[in-house]
């Protein structure tokens, strides 16, 4: 499991975002709206227990987490 960092410009971001979602990576705002602990998700990703994508678009950084792994971590109680 790993964190991938991708630098891109805003023109490429929309196409890449669609690819991420099709491969099972979900944006952080979805998880926060559904009650996931975002700080713990980031800690799990940094510890290598969850796959994450860090998209850098200009000065903005957007995180995407692999949905299946996030759901399993929540069921195990690692995100509470």
Image (spheres, helix red, strand yellow):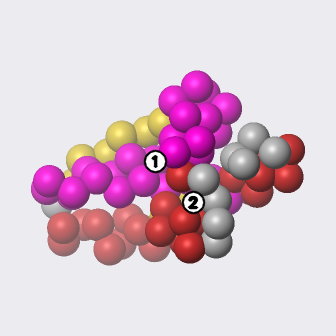
- Circle 1 packing at 10 Å, graded few (<14), some (14-19), many (20+), is many
Q: Which residue is mark 1?
A: 53
Q: Is residue 51 left or right of residue 61?
A: right
Region of the chain picked out in magenta, as a range: 39-67
Q: Is residue 18 magenta?
A: no
* Quadrant (top left/top right/bottom left/bottom right) for the N terminus: top right
- Tell me where residue 11 appears, x and y as whole percent: 19, 71
Q: Is residue 70 left or right of residue 3?
A: right
Say which element carries label 1. Answer: strand
- Circle 2 packing at 10 Å, graded few (<14), some (14-19), many (20+), is many
Q: Is residue 59 visible?
A: yes
Quarter of the image holding residue 40?
Answer: top right
Q: Which residue is mark 2?
A: 25
The numbered mark at residue 17 is: none
Say which element carries label 2. Answer: strand
- 1 and 61: which one is in front? 61
Quarter of the image holding residue 62?
Answer: bottom left
Cβ–Cβ below 8 Å for labels 2 and 1?
yes
* Residue extending farthest front: 80
Q: Is residue 52 visible?
A: no
- Residue beneath the point at 49% across and 56% down: 64
- Tell me where residue 18 appears, x and y as whole percent: 46, 73
- 11 and 53: which one is in front? 53
- Tell me where residue 60 appears, x and y as whole percent: 21, 57
Residue 9 vertical position relative to residue 76 in the rendered view, above or below:
below
Q: Is residue 42 magenta?
A: yes
- 70 and 19: which one is in front? 70
């Amino acid at each position: 499991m790993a964190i991938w960092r991708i630098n891109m410009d805003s023109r490429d971001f929309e196409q890449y975002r669609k690819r991420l979602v099709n491969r099972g990576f979900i944006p952080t705002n979805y998880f926060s709206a559904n009650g996931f602990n975002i700080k713990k998700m980031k800690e799990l990703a940094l510890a290598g227990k969850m796959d994450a994508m860090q998209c850098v678009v200009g000065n903005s950084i957007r995180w995407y987490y692999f949905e299946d792994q996030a759901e399993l971590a929540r069921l195990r109680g690692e995100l509470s």
